[in-house]
Image: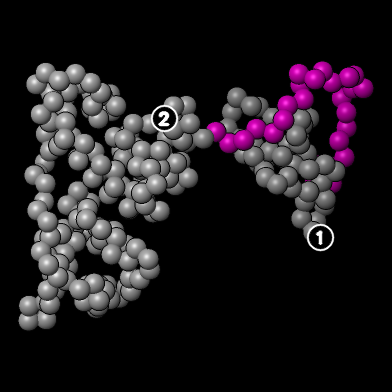
Amino acid sequence: MLKLDRSKPFGLISPPWHGDEGGPLLDRPAHYDQAGHLFDAHGREIVPGQPLVEESRRVVPASEVLPPLAPPPTNGETAATEASMTPAQVLAQADSLSFAILRKEAKRILGPTCPGNKIGIKAALEAAIAAYQEKQTKRYSGAKGMTWAGLAGQTPAEEEAPDEPAQPAPPAAQPPANGALDLAAWGRGQREYLFAEVRKAIRAKYNRTIFGEHERREAVYFLVDQGLIRASDARKDI
């Protein structure tokens, strides 16, 4: 009778499988599979249609009775559960982490304003890091204290200066010139239109209707997702 080799790759069957209807039922539920063989919760091979034949009547030590093992987590999830991640690490691993862990770490950093989707979280993290770096730039010449670079495992000399200066306040809302609405300029906060016109332009260009309580913010996230603007350039005033 084969035994489950826990040092080699194996699969976890959840919920345990009792066999297919119309075929031979298993005499005990299968918890694992390895190289085409089924095994019960104690790592003993299961042969469909054949009952278990005990090798002996000896009492099995408690140390040999092991609970079902869960599949190993991914590398990103292991790192996230072992210690809190820095903002830079969360942003760098945003596409490899499960959304539950990404949302948890982002909410820890961003607080109650944390967006509810991956695109929004990435944009908010980029904006938060850039804003903090801009505020801390003048403190590197001699001021002491914790910086965002320190949280990311860098020294002040390694942290880059802000990519661009703070954007001026957006102009007042205005109708599109000659019916042409610049979605990219609106998404970057360089132009302001009535949102009804923005919604209409997005629907005409992408066949997508934006609506809801946070429709202006969702529109910006959508334009980032479409590649029309960069997340780092997205407007922060909505």
Q: Quadrant of the C terminus?
A: bottom left
Give the magenta part as a residue range: 47-72
Which corner quadrant of the image does residue 202 belong to?
bottom left
N-terminal label among 2 and 1: 1
| SS assignment for the magenta stretch, majority | loop
In the picture of the structure, the residue carrying the numbered disc 1 is: 22
Task: Identify residue type, mark 2.
Answer: Ser
Q: Is residue 199 above or below residue 83?
A: below
- Residue at position x 16%, y 64% from top? 186
Q: Mark 1 packing: few (<14 Cα in 10 Å), some, or many (20+)?
A: few
Q: Mark 2 packing: few (<14 Cα in 10 Å), some, or many (20+)?
A: few
114 and 64: which is toward the camera: 114
173 and 95: which is toward the camera: 173
Q: How many marks?
A: 2
Element at badge 2? loop
Which corner quadrant of the image does residue 102 belong to?
top left
From the top left corner, tell me how far across and down residue 174 is, in percent: 12, 73
From the top left corner, tell me how far across and down residue 124 is, in percent: 29, 47
125 and 54: which is toward the camera: 125
What numbered label is drawn on residue 84? 2
- Residue at position x 19%, y 40% from top? 130
Is residue 54 shown in magenta?
Answer: yes
Is residue 27 shown in magenta?
Answer: no
Task: Identify residue type, mark 1.
Answer: Gly
